[in-house]
Image (cartoon, rainbow, N blue to C red):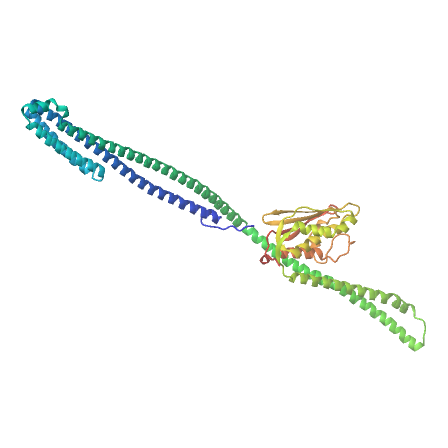
Amino acid sequence: MQPVTMTSLGRDARASRLIILMLSLGFVALLCAAVATFWIQRQNEQNAESVAHTLAVEASLGAFASASERMETARRGVLLTGNPSFTSLMDEANRNAQIRLNELDALIADNDSQRARVARLRALLAAYQRNHGQSVALSGAARQRMIANLTGDAVLGNIRAVRAVVGEMLDEELGLLRAREARQQRTQALFGATLIATGLLILLVAVGTLYLVGKNLIELRESREELRRLNENLEGLVDVRTAELQRANGEIQRFAYIVSHDLRSPLVNVMGFTAELETARKAIANYVERSDAEGWQAPDSATRFAVEEDLPEAIGFIRSSTQKMDRLINAILNLSRQGRRTLTPETLDLTALAQGIADSLEHRVQESGTTLTVEPLPAIVNDRLAVEQILSNLIENALKYLQPGRSGVIGVTGRTDQGRAIVAVADNGRGIDPRDHERVFDLFRRSGVQDQPGEGIGLAHARALAYRLGGFIEVRSAVNEGSTFCLNLPIQWTSGEENA
């Protein structure tokens, strides 16, 4: 099981970093949008100023052209009628044209080509004034010829040149206007695209952030709910731990009682039959005394019985009792050595482990006509030797205590539940009386008909190992209905979890 890292924003530290990253990205996007908006706004202002400047130049050119045309109209009035009012109009139009030229000169100060054209306009306007003065000074036939050729005189040529220069300036300003309008449109399009891209980015960031925040809020609610359940179950967990301690203490007390009782039994036999030997010794001693006193004679019936019956029987019982005591002591020493062995957790494939045990028992399985199946079991991290000893004991017991006259069926199955692996060894054997469900786990205790060899230490050893591995063994059984032994172990166990 993977550990979960708690953070201020939820369980998953990676999700929290993503939230912070997306929020930062959103702020950066907003900042970029603000900078882009400011820049584009400045570009728009510059473009608007450029367009306004071009329009002002065109307006000034139009005003200058209008003044020059009025000046030409007034000149013709002066020449044709000689009316002094036309002279005033011409002077006023000339002043207006000069003013417009000064405005143009100021407006096109940054445009060298236009400045050159304005200089030409000034020169043409000056030439116009000189030529007009010469025309006015004519008299007689010369004046008549000038009037007759009014459309071809030099003054009109000056006006036509002015019109051409004004047209060139208008064309250039029109080109500048179109270029500036196009640039303004591109800037506006860029501004719109930037706003749309920024809006989409902010929308994506907002959606992603809301999703992650919602997910973390759900995890926080689940964490609070889990914490609430843990708090509610804390008293129950304390009770369970207390019950486990009491159970361990009870195991120690039962072990002490069983050891003292079972070791005392062969000692009582030894002491009793030692007394029998003493009685037989006295009978033989009395016989020897009488033989010495009375001379050799055949043994009486009491002496013969002591020699032929009492002594062999007592010696046999003493020998069997001492052998039993030796087996019990060896079993206790073996359990002690197993309890002191250092357990080493490693990854275990329980399916392969159980199948290996089944393969080692194949000969006995075939002899008894038993069907032994091993289904897929979960993988765990635990001590290989200890787990193998437990499973070997459970599978061998299932094979050992089959019901005579019934085809044996043994199945090894497994599952996981809340971080623990549960392996069940089920058989259709003779079963165990419910009153003996706990007794069969006691040291040197067995249940039912004692027709199979054994000292009654296998299940006691298996349960003790299961406790050391952070688990336990339970049994469900009924007489003549088979038994199911369930081994419950943590999926991932470390030596610090030992329940020894």
**297 w.r.t. 162: above or below:** below
**81 w.r.t. 412: above or below:** above
Quarter holding residue 246: bottom right
| Residue pictured at 61% horizontal, 47% vertical | 416
- Residue 66, image x and y in percent? 16, 28
Q: Is residue 486 visible?
A: no
User: Which quadrant would the C terminus be assigned to in this image?
Assistant: bottom right
Front residue (pair 301, 476): 476
- Residue 214, image x and y in percent? 46, 42
**494 w.r.t. 112: above or below:** below
| Residue pictured at 74% horizontal, 52% vertical | 361
Front residue (pair 259, 227): 227
Front residue (pair 358, 475): 358
**281 w.r.t. 248: above or below:** below
Front residue (pair 390, 85): 85
Q: Is residue 334 left or right of residue 188?
A: right
Q: Which residue of the protein is positioned furthest toward the bottom in this rendering?
A: 293
Q: Is residue 187 visible?
A: yes
- Residue 20, image x and y in percent? 42, 47
Q: Is residue 256 left or right of residue 151?
A: right
- Residue 244, image x and y in percent? 61, 55
Quarter holding residue 87: top left
Q: Is residue 469 left or right of residue 178?
A: right
Q: How many marks?
A: 0
Q: Which residue of the protein is positioned furthest toward the left in this rendering?
A: 140
